Structures are given as C-alpha cells and as structure tokens.
Image (cartoon, rainbow, N blue to C red):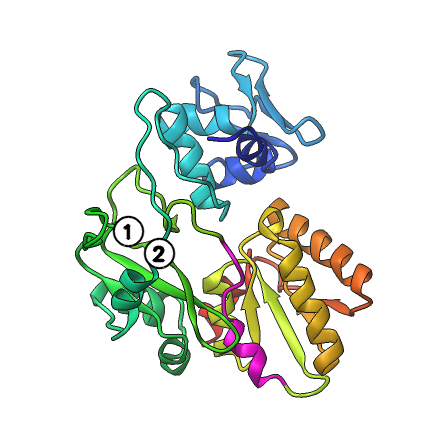
C-alpha cells in the first residue's frame, strides 16, 4: 500500500470513522470501548484528527481506531476503512512474494459484459437496495458474475464473485475497462476492483453524447451515485475520486464547455473525500472557465445514492 493511500485513510475525519464503528459521538466525546466506561471519557480532537481516553490512555488516529475496534490486522483494517469511505486503493501485494501482473485484456472483458446478466445478488443490490431504474442498468450494460471466471490468456480471474461489473466506455461506446463491485460477504476482499495496471477513467462517457446545448451534467463520486443520478432523470458521469482526476479528464470537461456550453453540477458526498473532490473539480472548472454548481443533500444523507434509495 502506497504512502499517499495511507495518508488518505489517516485524513478521514476521526469522528466519522468512530460513527461507522458504532460509537455514539456527542460534543466530541463518546463512551470508551476499551474499558468499562459509564461516563464518556473518550475525547476526539477534530483539529489533530485523533482520539484519546483520559482514563485508560487509549489513543491514536483513524487507522488505529479501526484496528482496535474491528480486531483486524493492519492491511485488512485499512481495506475496511477504504470500503466504508469509498476510497479506492490499489491492490496490496506482499513485498516478499510479488505477484505477476498483466494489463487488462479487453477481449476477455468484452466477453464478460457482452451479454449482460444480473444474478440474485445484483438484483437485490441494484433494484431493492439502491432503487436504480432498470432502464439505466440496461443502457449502461451493467452485468454480474456468480463465478470467478479465469482469463483464458493469463489463467487467473480478474474479479471476485459474486460481483457487479460496470463497463467503462468511450464517448462512442468502445469498451475501455471494467470495474467490479464485490457483493459477497467474505472478509478481506476489496469491495471495488479494476484489473491490475489498468487506468481508472470516467464512467458513463456515452451520456455526454446525449447532452443538449447548455444542459446540465452532474459529476458524481463513484458509479452507484452516477446510476442514482441517471435514475432521477439527470445526466451524469462518475469520477472515482479527487486523486484520480487526470489532466485528460479535465480536458474532456473543457471540451464539453466549448462544444455544448455544459453547466456542471455536483452533490458532494458529506465526508472529507467528497469535499476534496468538490474542491478539485471547482479548481478545474475555474481553470477552464466553466460553471460548477454545488447542490446540497438533505440533512442525514451521506451521498446522493443513499438519498435516492429513500425516494424511488
């Protein structure tokens, strides 16, 4: 795991991490889970992004808290944090036993999504949990796998199963890559996965071909929020995160501003990564002379997908 990835996890808001771990934080305090505590003695320092118990001296940052409360080893605790906060990490590999990596095999990927099929886990997640419109799922060519199918050239599967498969295509519909979202319950498996060495780009690019002159385009963080925005009748594309926004992506947004006078919108996720992506996109919009409108989510909802699931 790279240092910059660990820094992303260390910068996750400590009180948000505590909340996801089941602690009830009120006025920067909570009952300490590390000793028999009847009065809140676990304090959170938002500025330093740390916690400390003044009774048992338990202390640390977001990663330390995740390790101690989940009981997971360091790497698994980091993966848990990444999954819970939609932080995409490169796949960790032990330094002493490096694994051979291959570039994505587009022909193999095409076979996986050529005839989309949705298994029971996929239908439960998309239609019942997230309330994604079936027409959106069909249009975006979303598929699923129930068995990890090995690549015939390289002899290993790219994805775990059961998983959703999200095709990443060019504006004209040519397949570039496929991202999986693990739907199983086995511990230690990353929730999101791209083929090793593959480049992470924008999801939903065929949408921009349907943009009318001066129409709004929503920029989401992650595929499932993008699908929710599309289900709501908005036109949307997905950018995985602030650190994954590439110069080529900014150039595409600049071209849309010129070609179609596109007005950009965003519902920032209510967490630090969401704010970081918003600030990065706002900076990019200012650089290219585009308009980025910030839309606010109702109180109590972390992201657009969560809100949409209660509305549909």
Residue 108, horizontal then vertical, whole percent: 27, 61
**Residue 204 drawn in magenta:** yes
Q: Residue at x 63, y 61 (%)?
A: 249
Residue assigned mark 2? 180
Q: Residue at x 35, y 70 (%)?
A: 142
Residue 89 relative to residue 216: left or right:
left
Assign a secondary structure to mark 1: loop
Residue extending furthest top?
A: 56
Residue 287, horizontal then vertical, whole percent: 81, 59
Residues tagged 1 and 2 counted as in contact (Cβ below 8 A)? yes
Residue 141 relative to residue 33: left or right:
left
Residue extending furthest bottom?
A: 212
Closer-to-camera residue (105/35) = 105
Place residue 53 in its image quadrant.
top right
Residue 245, horizontal then vertical, whole percent: 62, 53
Spatial CA distance of label 1 from label 2 is 7 Å
Quadrant for the C terminus in the image: bottom left
Task: Report the span colored magenta.
Answer: 200-211
């Amino acid at each position: 795991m790279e240092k910059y990835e660990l820094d992303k996890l260390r910068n996750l808001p400590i009180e948000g991490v505590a909340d996801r771990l089941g602690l009830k934080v009120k006025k920067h305090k909570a009952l300490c889970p590390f000793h028999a505590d009847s009065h809140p003695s676990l304090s959170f320092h938002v500025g330093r992004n740390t916690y400390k118990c003044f009774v048992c001296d338990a202390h640390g940052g977001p990663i330390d808290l995740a390790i101690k409360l989940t009981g997971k080893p360091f790497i698994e605790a980091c993966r848990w944090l990444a999954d819970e906060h939609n932080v995409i990490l490169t796949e960790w590999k032990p330094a002493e036993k490096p694994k051979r990596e291959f570039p994505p095999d587009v022909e193999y990927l095409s076979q996986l999504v050529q005839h989309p099929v949705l298994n029971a886990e996929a239908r439960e997640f998309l239609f019942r949990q997230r309330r994604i419109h079936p027409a959106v799922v069909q249009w975006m060519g979303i598929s699923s796998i129930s068995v990890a199918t090995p690549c015939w050239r390289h002899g290993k599967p790219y994805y775990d199963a059961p998983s959703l498969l999200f095709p990443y295509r060019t504006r004209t519909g040519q397949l570039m890559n496929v991202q999986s979202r693990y739907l199983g319950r086995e511990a230690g498996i990353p929730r999101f996965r791209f083929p090793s060495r593959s480049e992470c780009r924008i999801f939903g690019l065929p949408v921009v071909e349907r943009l009318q002159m001066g129409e709004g385009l929503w920029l989401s963080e992650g595929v499932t929020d993008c699908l929710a925005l599309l289900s709501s009748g908005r036109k949307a594309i997905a950018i995985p995160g602030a650190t994954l926004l590439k110069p080529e992506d900014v150039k595409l947004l600049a071209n849309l501003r010129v070609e179609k006078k596109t007005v950009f919108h965003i519902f920032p996720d209510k967490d630090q990564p969401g704010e970081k992506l918003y600030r990065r996109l706002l900076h990019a919009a200012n650089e290219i002379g585009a308009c980025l409108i910030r839309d606010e989510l109702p109180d109590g909802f972390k992201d657009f997908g969560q809100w949409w699931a209660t509305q549909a």
